[in-house]
Image (spheres, grey):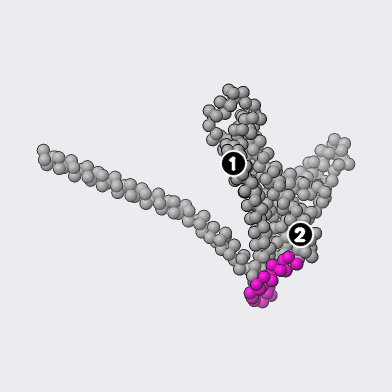
Amino acid sequence: MAGSSSFKRNKNFKNGEDIAINTNKKDKSQSLFIFFMLLWPIIHWLIFTLLMNVQTVVYSFQKINKFTGQVRFAGLENYVELFEKIIRNLGSWGTAFRNTFLWVGVNVLIVVPLSLVIAYFLSKKIPFHRFFSTVLFIPNIISIVVLTMVWSFVWGPTQGIVNTLLELLGLGKYTRIWLGDPKTALINIFLYRVWAGIGFNNLILSGAIAKIPREILEAAEIDGASNWQEFFHIIIPSVWPTISTLTILGATGAFTIFLIPELLTGGQYGTTTITLKIVGEVLAGGSYGLASAAGITIGVFGFLVVYLIKMFLDRMEEKWS
């Protein structure tokens, strides 16, 4: 009996040892999996975010001879030259600043709120809600180059769909070169942004709304709450952290807008942005130091703007809470 008991203890000990070994192997394999999954994003961030930003700061204090490649420390020369250039060309730079702030407004005050309203009504399972969700998200899975080509075709001056419809309806006097007229080009680009930007925000907000406990919504319905009351007193407070995140992303994105106006108008007809101006400085004069100084200046300026927006959102969150 004693031998049998000892054998059982040894067997149990061995089984426990095997389980511990298997657990350790599983933990190691999970750790290796996590390590290799994070390795590329970390390398990407180190090279294309940290290194590039550090290099930009260094360039902003240097003068580089584009013919000989000779580099010299320039102190604040690039920053002084930048502000002198802004003062000399206040009109074009003023337009760029104005448009950038308008981009902030479009992203924050139109795209995000409109996406929230659409996400709310789609959550009510209206007819064809899945179809509408898919259609809204399509612009986010198509190349921006293709999208802008389609948009340019729709608003084209001769064979564009909009002008053709106006002609058919006897409204030919209202046809125009929509993307080539300073009066309509910027508005047209903002319309493109709203059309192309709603899908992503709608997807994120729909997911946030879906996580709201159904019991809360059912209780509100039993209490006789209208859609208006449900939207403002339940939906918005519940998804406010998501709204804040999308608002911050929209505000920061406005300071890096480049491709959309470049592809649709080439930055002409009053549609230029700060980023387009910076790129123009590099292409025109090859002054990487000046462009870097402009990038740093705009980055600091953008940070302050976004920080103020973040403070406002935090105060609103306290109110909604």
Displayed quadrant of residue 234: top right
- Is 303 above or below relative to 83? above
**According to the image, label 2 marks what residue?**
93
Residue depicted at x 76% and y 59%? 93
Residue 68 within the magenta-colored segment of the rendering: yes
Tag shown at residue 192: none
Residue sitting nearer the eye, 272 or 130:
272
Q: Amino acid at mark 1?
A: Glu
Secondary structure found at label 2? helix
Task: Report the residue at 55% width, 29% height from top.
Answer: 216
Q: Are marks 2 and 1 in contact (CB under 8 Å)?
A: no
Camera sees residue 315: yes
Residue at the (51%, 59%) spot, across then down: 43
Which of the image's four quarters has the C terminus?
Answer: top right
Image position, residue 242 (x, y; %): 58, 42
Say left or right for 265 vs 122: right
Q: Position of residue 318 (x, y in %)?
A: 59, 41
Q: Secondary structure at mark 1?
A: helix
- Residue 318's disc is 1
Q: Give how far apart the Cα atoms at labels 2 and 1 are.
A: 38 Å
Span colored in magenta: 62-84
- Is the residue 91 above or below the residue 215 in the image? below
Kindly identify the residue that appears in the image at 64 percent across and 46 percent down: 312
Badge 1 local density, few (<14 within 10 Å), some, or many (20+)?
few
* Quadrant in which the N terminus appears: top left
Identify which amino acid the numbered label 2 is placed on.
Trp
208 vs 74, left or right, is left
Q: Is residue 36 above or below residue 209?
A: below
Residue 148 pos. (x, y %)? 71, 48
- Magenta-colored stretch includes residue 237: no
